[in-house]
Image (spheres, grey):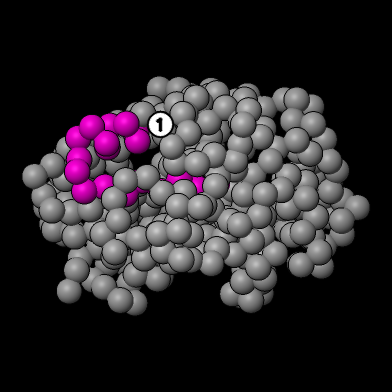
Amino acid sequence: MSNVLIIGASGLVGSYLYRLISNEYDTTGTFRGHPLKNAIYLDITDRQAVREIILRTSPDYVFLPAALTNVDRCEEEKELCFGVNVGGTQNIVDALKGTAAKLVYFSTDYIFDGRNGPYSESDQPHPLSEYGKSKLEGETNIQRNLDNFLIIRTTCVYGWEPQEKNFAINLIKKIRAGDKIEVPIDQITTPTYAGSLAEITWGLAKKDKRGIYNVAGNSLLSRLEFAYLVSAIFGLDRSLIQGVKTQVMQHRALRPLNGGLKIDKIKEELGLGIPGSREGLLLMQKERAYE
């Protein structure tokens, strides 16, 4: 039986991976900021600690959803951003050199500038933000130093998570509290249900796929359109959603406007049906009632 290590199992993507894979294989999860039952504390910027957990678990698969993903914080704290997203990734890469383990790294459409999206795996990256630059550098280091890797690019991931940070759950929480929320009308994306992302990624890993794969939802729409869809499916007050242009929101970091990811590659290679936003939100709703 294979051993699996999920670095960042308490986050959104990591928690879905952990629930899915631990039912099938011997799985070790790690956390840093948010404790998780039966998981191990790990700071990926601690080079020795990373080496020790790799040696202790002898993984066949290492999933790396852990990252500093707050885009504006990354812009303000560049050193921290690159320390985690580049330095932390490099520590894992170095610890895996000479092993047979497959590294599965999660990246983003923020490595693109949002001028000509949605993007395929072969399109040329051009990040606008420090977050995007750090994730692209993580990709580059993996490709230069490892042979057995899988880079999963995804975007606008949503689903249930204890931290309630992702776009959909944050919108649900605010509107149910009676708060108004501003949503950009000019950011185009392909929202991705975390459950589907986990299932497809695990399927790719087990098939020993290597290289770069886009795994994203099958709907291209603006964040405002997605917000309206969330409100319709979860029975929220749509009038509390206010559409605004991105520049009005005064983010610290630039966002790719015409973004999103093409998923032709996984459709062709795997023949997979990827849920669109409505189907993904219905799966999320069915998963459990929001408390």
Residue at the image position 46 percent from the left and 66 percent from the top: 271
Looking at the image, is 145 positioned above or below residue 219?
above
Residue 80 position in % (x across, y down):
41, 27
Q: Say whether residue 121 is visible.
A: yes
Q: Taking 198 as reference, is 162 left or right?
A: right
Residue at the image position 25 percent from the left and 63 percent from the top: 4
The 10 Å Cα crowd at callout 1, few under 14, some 14 to 19, many 20 or more, is many
In this rendered view, identify the residue nearer to me: 197 or 179: 197
- Asked if the magenta segment contains residue 145, the reply would be yes
The N terminus lies in quadrant: bottom left
Looking at the image, is 276 positioned above or below residue 142?
below
Secondary structure beneath label 1:
helix
- Asked if the magenta segment contains residue 269, the reply would be no
| Residue that lies at the very extreme toward the left in this rendered image | 98
In this rendered view, identify the residue nearer to me: 200 or 160: 200
Looking at the image, is 40 positioned above or below residue 117?
below
Q: Label 1: which residue?
A: 136
- Give residue 268's quadrant in the image: bottom left
Residue 92 position in % (x across, y down):
23, 42
The C terminus lies in quadrant: bottom right
Residue at the image position 53 percent from the left and 67 percent from the top: 273
In this rendered view, identify the residue nearer to me: 91 or 40: 91
Residue at the image position 13 percent from the left and 53 percent from the top: 100
Magenta stretch bounds = 138-155
Residue 260 position in % (x across, y down):
59, 43
Q: Say whether residue 73 is visible.
A: no
Looking at the image, is 6 positioned above or below residue 107?
below
Q: Amino acid at mark 1?
A: Leu
